[in-house]
Amino acid sequence: VYVDGRYKILTVDASDNYIDLDLAYSAPDTATTTNVAGALATIQLGLDLAVAGDTLKLCHGTYDVAVALTEDTNDGTTEEMRWILGVDSTTGEKVSGTRPVLLASADIAGIIVVTAKGDYTRWESIYFDGADLTDTCLDGDDSLWAVEIVDCIIEDANTGIAYWTSNYGKFTNNDIRSCAIAGAVSSSSGNGGAWVGNGIHDNAIGLNIVAAHADIQHNRIYGNTGDGLLIAATGDNSVIRNNTIENNDGDGADIADQAYGCYVSRNTSSGNGAY
């Protein structure tokens, strides 16, 4: 029997993994228990179950993360990505305002820690609040393929994003802020990732690229206490185009002499400590 309607969930049995709803019918039917539209009791279970082509929807609200959420079970594919999406709890559609918050409620190794899996996975419209983490909000692995972070807020940790870039990672329209060492650090192998349309501000270093072939376009990098953009000697053949880099206390953009083949065009740099 399919019963359409809106229901209030009063209790959740965490041992069951699924959120259940008691439905009481009139005689001669008896009461029964059913899953609520496949709702899961924990985000970790969702990550463990989501396979290529699946969308894991996080309703807006605040989720305390006392143990790092791990990606060590499933990958997406080039044809069917896995998608973790922040949604409105009423419509089930992508949030247009307040994002669901993943809040580090302890000083853990990261809000999301990717170990063996997580290729071809897209994270969209989520607020990652490190709450003064001494580690990283999003801690990845140099072996990752084609991870996407889109329209997210990443803040208040030692480092916002680390090592998610190798092998064509994409980071688009995010707000990366208030991190003690760097807003983001690229992988040290593979490539430096595609960084497009992000706001990167109020960190120590804004964006630190240590791998080759980074694509850095249309970002606003500003108000960082160190360098806005740092390209290491290993950041060869990176493209730096149409960015606004302003009011950083260190260099606006510091590109190592040994980083050969970099293409720099149509950037605006002003009010920085140097360069």
Image: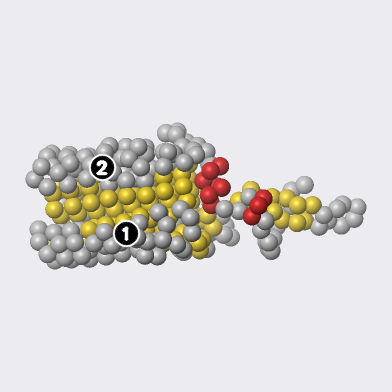
Which numbered disc flags the more N-terminal residue, 2 or 1? 1
Residues at circles 2 and 1 in contact by the CB criterion of under 8 Å? no
The answer to which image quadrant residue 6 occupies is bottom right
Point out residue 15 in the picture as x, y percentages from the top left corner: 65, 52
**Image point 17% across, 48% down: which residue?**
231
Residue where numbered disc 1 is placed: 158
Amino acid type shown at disc 1: Asn
How would you rate the neighbour count of disc 1 (Cα within 10 Å): few for under 14, some for 14-19, many for 20 or more?
many
How would you rate the neighbour count of disc 2 (Cα within 10 Å): few for under 14, some for 14-19, many for 20 or more?
many
The answer to which image quadrant residue 181 occupies is bottom left
Amino acid type shown at disc 2: Ser
Point out residue 267 in the picture as x, y percentages from the top left corner: 16, 54
**Which quarter shows the C terminus?**
bottom left
**Label 2, label 1: how far apart the Cα atoms are:** 18 Å
**Image point 44% across, 34% down: which residue?**
77
**Image point 18% across, 43% down: which residue?**
235
Q: Is residue 228 visible?
A: yes
Point out residue 239 in the picture as x, y percentages from the top left corner: 19, 44
**Image point 37% across, 46% down: which residue?**
140
Which color scheme is applied? secondary structure
Residue where numbered disc 2 is placed: 188
In this rendering, the answer to whether 72 lies above or below 109 is above
Judged from the image, the secondary structure of the residue bearing numbered disc 2 is loop
* Left or right placement of residue 169 versus residue 89 in this view: left
* Left or right placement of residue 116 versus residue 265 in this view: right
Q: Nearer the viewer, residue 117 or 216?
A: 117
The answer to which image quadrant residue 14 occupies is bottom right
* Left or right placement of residue 178 versus residue 10 in this view: left
Point out residue 223 in the picture as x, y percentages from the top left corner: 22, 65
Number of on-image labels: 2
Q: Nearer the viewer, residue 38 or 87?
A: 38
